[in-house]
């Protein structure tokens, strides 16, 4: 389990969901507000709970063994995590939810950027919220902002403020530590890399290193917008923070 997944599992919202599932009171529709960088990881961890035969999300049942990193035969992922699905995407994913589970006791659908749903796209979800299949569960994610009341009133609402739960993390020390981190970057999701950079920012701020915190935040923002992959973001951080590369090069990264 990654450090980010561990932090998510410690959150009160996750514990509330886990308790409901274990007591056979799992809601068929969830609405979770959380910071954007955590959305994919939150969705995967909640899906692990829902799709596990025993409800703990981490055992040797056939469903848990079917996970391949963040993919599962009964986990219906959005086409894009950083974009609200349109009406056609919502209809397609809803239709997939009505299909019988492949290996798990349920199927689990995720709708990202819920507050950005158009009214027609939101209305297309009403049927599945009112008449879900017995094996279907739906998660709507948002980083703030509201949902149409017709949608929100049909969901179980939770807030996950993981920014407060993620402690500061010291920067790598020396060239070897940086090279090891860069080499492992391909194994991280973008969300994990962004959270790690946020933890470094908190550490720098706590130690009064304002300029280094600002530098990390600039590269974090570039990575978040999708301009560079994880390994390049860490490589640039090493160059700027340890090799004192000129920040004039930022103009070429946007």
Image (cartoon, grey):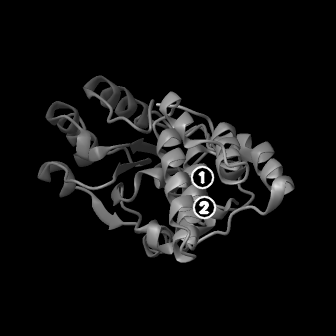
Label 1, on which residue?
192
Disc 2 element? helix
Please name the residue shown 54% across and 45% down the image.
219
> Disc 1 or 2, which lies upstream in sequence?
2
Q: CA distance from mark 1 to mark 2?
A: 7 Å
- Residue 151 lies, in percent from the top left, at 19, 49
Viewed as shown, does residue 1 lie left or right of 195?
right
Location of residue 165 with respect to 5 vertically, above or below = below
Q: Nearer the viewer, residue 144 or 63?
A: 144
Disc 1 element? helix
Q: Nearer the viewer, residue 9 or 215?
A: 215
- Residue 21 lies, in percent from the top left, at 48, 67
- Residue 97 lies, in percent from the top left, at 42, 37
Contact flag, marks 1 and 2 (Cβ < 8 Å)? yes
Location of residue 74 with respect to 154 vertically, above or below = above
Viewed as shown, does residue 101 lie left or right of 60?
left
How crowded pointer 1 is (Cα within 10 Å; few <14, some 14-19, many 20+) is rated as: many
Q: Nearer the viewer, residue 61 or 17?
A: 17
Q: Which residue is situated farthest in the top direction here? A: 88
The label on residue 4 is: 2
How crowded pointer 2 is (Cα within 10 Å; few <14, some 14-19, many 20+) is rated as: some
């Amino acid at each position: 389990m990654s450090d980010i997944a561990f932090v998510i599992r410690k959150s009160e919202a996750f514990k509330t969901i886990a308790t409901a599932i274990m007591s056979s009171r799992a809601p068929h529709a969830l609405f979770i507000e959380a910071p954007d960088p955590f959305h994919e990881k939150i969705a995967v961890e909640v899906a692990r709970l829902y799709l596990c035969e025993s409800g703990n999300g981490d055992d040797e049942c056939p469903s848990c063994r079917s996970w391949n990193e963040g993919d599962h035969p009964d986990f219906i992922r959005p086409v894009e995590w950083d974009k609200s699905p349109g009406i056609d995407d919502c209809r397609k994913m809803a239709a997939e939810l009505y299909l019988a589970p492949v290996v798990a006791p349920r199927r689990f659908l995720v709708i990202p950027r819920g507050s950005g749903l158009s009214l027609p796209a939101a209305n297309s979800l009403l049927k599945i919220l009112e008449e879900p299949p017995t094996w279907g569960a739906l998660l709507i994610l948002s980083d703030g902002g509201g949902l149409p009341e017709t949608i929100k009133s049909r969901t179980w609402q939770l807030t996950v403020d993981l920014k407060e739960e993620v402690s500061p993390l010291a920067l790598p020390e020396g060239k070897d530590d940086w090279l090891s981190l860069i080499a492992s970057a391909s194994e991280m999701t973008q969300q994990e890399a962004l959270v790690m950079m946020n933890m470094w920012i908190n550490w720098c701020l706590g130690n009064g290193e304002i300029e280094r915190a600002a530098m990390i935040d600039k590269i974090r923002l570039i990575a978040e917008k999708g301009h560079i992959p994880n390994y390049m973001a860490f490589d640039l951080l090493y160059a700027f923070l340890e090799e004192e590369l000129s920040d004039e090069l930022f103009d070429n990264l946007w």
